[in-house]
Image (cartoon, grey):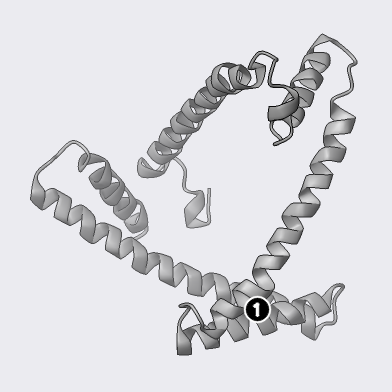
Amino acid sequence: MRNGPLLVTFVVGAGLVAVFFIPHHRVQEGQSVLLDWANVVYAFALILGSLSLWASHQKKFLTRAEGWPYSLVTLASLAFVTVAGSVQGVEEGTLVNKYYNMVNSPLASTMFALLAFFIASAAFRAFRARNAEATLLLGTAIDMMIRRVSVAEFLCSGFPPVTEWLLDVPNLAAKRAIALGIGLGAISTALKIILGIDRSYLGRS
């Protein structure tokens, strides 16, 4: 049936929307079952993603493409974590947990530390006071960087709480506007998928 996936998507999507307006316990139980099915789909998607990752890096390694040593490390890590996690699990004290704490966590911390320098460099180039807007942005950035460190509580104790006002009024207003925009965009995208207007998830337009 060519339109089968569209029909399934419409029924499931419309059903999940309807449960928010039907407080009956039977309907809520059906929602719990659907959410459990979603976990099963997620597990298969994880397996499919792992196989795709393996195939991609295996091809790079076998053809000795540029950066193939990194592909070898990726393949070895993927195989180790998959086997060790399947045998021992991921609880405290297992090989996967030790690998995460001794390898992955320090690498992530290093990446975030380097990211801070990239952000500082980009801010230096972007916050040049070329006009009134850039000057306002520069002043706000300087105030935030100075007042959000521990020593500022001692040095700036006699100054008005400008930083708190910036965070609680303009910043919060902008965050709420962005959140509203994201919510409306998510609703629009969901309706397009449920109604079959957007069929990109099927691999065709």
Using the image, determine if residue 48 lies above or below residue 123. below
Residue 147 in sight here? no
Q: Residue at x 52, y 22 (%)?
A: 177
Q: Residue at x 15, y 55 (%)?
A: 29
User: x%, y% of residue 74?
Assistant: 70, 77
Q: Is residue 48 left or right of residue 121?
A: left
Q: Residue at x 83, y 15 (%)?
A: 135
User: x%, y% of residue 198?
Assistant: 47, 43
Say how many tags the image has: 1
Q: Of 185 and 80, which appears nearest the observer?
A: 80
Quadrant of the image for the N terminus?
A: bottom left
Q: Residues within 10 Å of mark 1 (few under 14, many from 20)?
A: few
Q: Of 139 and 79, which appears nearest the observer?
A: 139
User: x%, y% of residue 64?
Assistant: 85, 81
Q: Name the image quarter holding residue 71.
A: bottom right
Q: Residue at x 35, y 69 (%)?
A: 40
User: x%, y% of residue 53?
Assistant: 63, 73
Q: Of 188 and 128, which appears nearest the observer?
A: 128
Question: Which residue in the rendered view is the most extreme toward the top?
Answer: 132
Q: Is residue 29 left or right of residue 3?
A: left
Q: Name the image quarter holding residue 192.
A: top left
* Residue hosting label 1: 55
Using the image, determine if residue 4 lies above or below residue 139. below
Name the element at disc 1.
helix
Q: Of 158 and 183, which appears nearest the observer?
A: 158
Q: Is residue 3 left or right of residue 150?
A: left
**Type of the residue with mark 1:** Ala
Using the image, determine if residue 41 lies above or below residue 169. below
Residue 178 in sight here? yes
